């Protein structure tokens, strides 16, 4: 999606690619479930009145997720480097992975950053890669 707003009234199930471009809004009134595939945010806002449940695949990019997020896949904030803001909680399961890129000292410019407004729990792997 590269312009405007998309809204979904039911549970949204992703098994392919959902790409939300800059200045776009994506809203689902129930849960967003991804079993495979990829969700990519490019300075976008992603809102779920339910939860964002990444059971597999990749959640990547920068922008804002207005929901609680459970990650059993791969969270790759930024596009090389960038900031991903989660306004709810973040729970990474034992099978989940968080990949952080680092190339300097400035958040969002030289290294990835994930800001979580509520509880944040990492039970799986944390990978830090120097660029």
Image (spheres, helix red, strand yellow):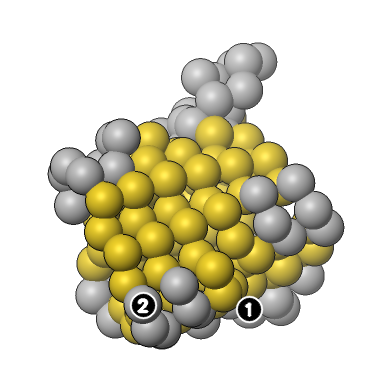
Above-or-below relation of 131 to 42: above
**Residue 73 horizontal/vertical position (percent):** 52, 72
Report whether residue 100 is seen: yes
Q: Are marks 1 and 2 in contact (CB under 8 Å)?
A: no
Gap in angstroms between the C-alphas marked 1 and 2: 30 Å
Identified at 36% across, 77% down, the residue is 9
Q: Which mark is residue 95?
A: 1
Above-or-below relation of 118 to 33: above
Seen in the image, is 75 located left or right of residue 114? left
Identified at 45% across, 39% down, the residue is 62
Above-or-below relation of 28 to 78: below
Mark 1 or 2 closer to N-term? 2
Q: Between 76 and 89, which is closer to the camera in this rendering? A: 89
Q: Between 75 and 20, which is closer to the camera in this rendering? A: 20
Identified at 32% across, 72% down, the residue is 8
- Quarter where residue 43 is shown: top left
**Residue bearing the label numbered 2:** 9
Q: Between 39 and 105, which is closer to the camera in this rendering? A: 39
Tell me the element at label 1: loop
Report whether residue 127 is seen: no
């Amino acid at each position: 999606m590269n312009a405007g707003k998309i809204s979904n009234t039911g549970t949204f199930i992703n098994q392919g690619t959902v790409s939300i471009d800059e200045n776009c809004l994506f809203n689902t009134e129930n849960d967003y479930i991804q079993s495979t595939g990829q969700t990519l945010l490019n300075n976008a806002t992603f809102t779920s009145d339910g939860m964002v449940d990444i059971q597999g695949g990749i959640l990547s990019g920068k922008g804002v997720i207005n929901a609680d997020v459970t990650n059993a896949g791969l969270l790759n904030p930024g596009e090389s480097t960038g900031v991903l803001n989660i306004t709810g909680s973040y729970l990474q399961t034992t099978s989940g992975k968080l990949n952080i890129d680092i190339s300097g000292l400035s958040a969002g410019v030289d290294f990835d950053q994930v800001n979580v407004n509520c509880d944040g729990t990492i039970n799986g792997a944390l990978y830090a890669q120097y660029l």
